[in-house]
Image (cartoon, helix red, strand yellow):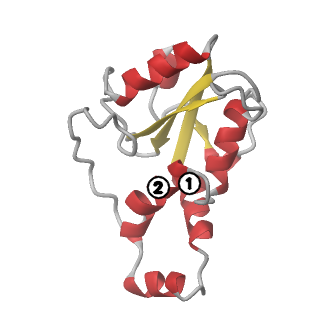
Amino acid sequence: MIEILGGGARGAYRFAAWPNREVPAGGPGLYTIWHEDGRFLYVGLAGAGGGSGGLYGRLKSHASGRRSGDQFCVYVADRLVLPLLSRAEIESIAAGRIPFDALLRAYIRRRLLYRFAPLASASEARGLEASLRRGAWRHGPPLLNPDPGAAAVSPRAPSRDGG
């Protein structure tokens, strides 16, 4: 299972090509999100609570770039997009002239990729998610949602163009 989730950006699905009909709608599953430069950004669990959206619904929410109700989008906005913005862009967002969610959506669609794996049970999904958040694989913990007890990882600073 880890092989499916851990191949990095190479061969992963691009958010730019969303929607993806291969992603199952129901049942528990796990997904990993990668930056196009290969950084492991996020691991998420979907469908463990019996919700109807499953992996498809969760990844659809992430692809939308809407921060409201989507913690992944908040993390990407705060940690990856905001540092790239100029003072003038930030002021335009604050004044309501530029919609921040639109910038976020563009970044996600242009730069981020995902992998997914349906799992047999919610408990299996929770256990694997916890393990990946702790960094118990060659990619280390995810940049955006590591387990608080995982060793701190210092990411490379992204370039001005988002790379």
Task: Work out which quarter of the rendered image holds the C terminus and state it.
Answer: bottom left
Q: Give me the disc on residue 22.
A: none
Q: Decide: marks 1, 2 in contact (CB < 8 A)?
A: yes
Taking the spot 46% from the left edge, 45% from the top edge, the residue there is 36
Of all residues, the one furthest to the top in this rendering is 120
- Check disc 1 and report the residue beneath it: 108
Instruction: Inspect the image, locate mark 1, and give the three-letter code of the amino acid beneath it.
Output: Ile
Q: Is residue 15 above or below residue 74?
A: above
**Which SS class for mark 2?**
helix
- Residue 85 position, x and y percent, is 42, 74
Q: Which residue is mark 2?
A: 76
Q: Quadrant of residue 161?
A: bottom left
Mark 1 or 2, closer to the camera? 2
In the rendered image, which quarter is residue 79 located in?
bottom left
Residue at the spot 65% in from the left edge and 41% down from the top edge: 59
* x 42%, y 62%: residue: 78
What is the quadrant of residue 30 in the picture? top right
Query: In front: 76, or 34?
Result: 76
Q: Earlier in the sequence, mark 1 or mark 2?
A: 2
Q: Say few, some or many: other residues with alpha carbon within 10 Å of mark 2 (under 14 / 14 to 19 / 20 or more).
A: many
